[in-house]
Image (cartoon, helix red, strand yellow):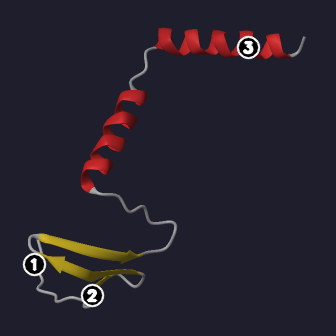
Amino acid sequence: MLILSRKKNESIMIGDDVEIMITDVSGEVVKLGISAPRRVSVHRKEVYEAIKAENLSASKASTAQLSSLSQFLRSRQSGQKR
């Protein structure tokens, strides 16, 4: 892990297109401004971990669950055609 010291309004660069700036320091709270291209996802770690867990859970859907979902969607689709 790289540890850097920065003051308010100073920044660091990650690669050529991600900039992280210290916007405010108040007690033990540091506010960061992050400038990154839209193709780069930026999340707080707890949000990232929740997304990762949800994606893993969704990828473990059983064949029976998928079959049931498929039947449900087909029945809704045929109901809309009437």
Residue topped by disc 3: 76
Q: Where 19 falls versus 55 (above or below)? A: below
Q: Which mark is residue 3?
A: 1
| Dot 3: element | helix
Q: Amino acid at mark 2?
A: Ser
Q: Where 29 falls versus 58 (above or below)? A: below
Q: Mark 1 and mark 3: span between their CA atoms?
A: 55 Å
Q: Which mark is residue 42?
A: none
Front-most of residues 11 and 57: 11
Q: Earlier in the sequence, mark 1 or mark 3?
A: 1
Q: Earlier in the sequence, mark 3 or mark 2?
A: 2
Q: Nearer the viewer, mark 2 or mark 1?
A: 2
5 relative position to 45: left or right: left
| Dot 1: element | loop
Which part of the image, by quadrant, shows the N terminus? Answer: bottom left
Residue 44 position in % (x across, y down)? 29, 57
8 relative position to 66: left or right: left
Q: Are marks 2 and 1 in contact (CB under 8 Å)?
A: no
Which part of the image, by quadrant, shows the C terminus? Answer: top right
Q: Are marks 1 and 3 in contact (CB under 8 Å)?
A: no
Q: Mark 3 and mark 2: span between their CA atoms?
A: 53 Å
Residue topped by disc 2: 11
Mark 1 crowdedness (10 Å alpha carbons): few <14, some 14-19, many ≥20: few
Which residue sits at x=10%, y=78%?
Answer: 3
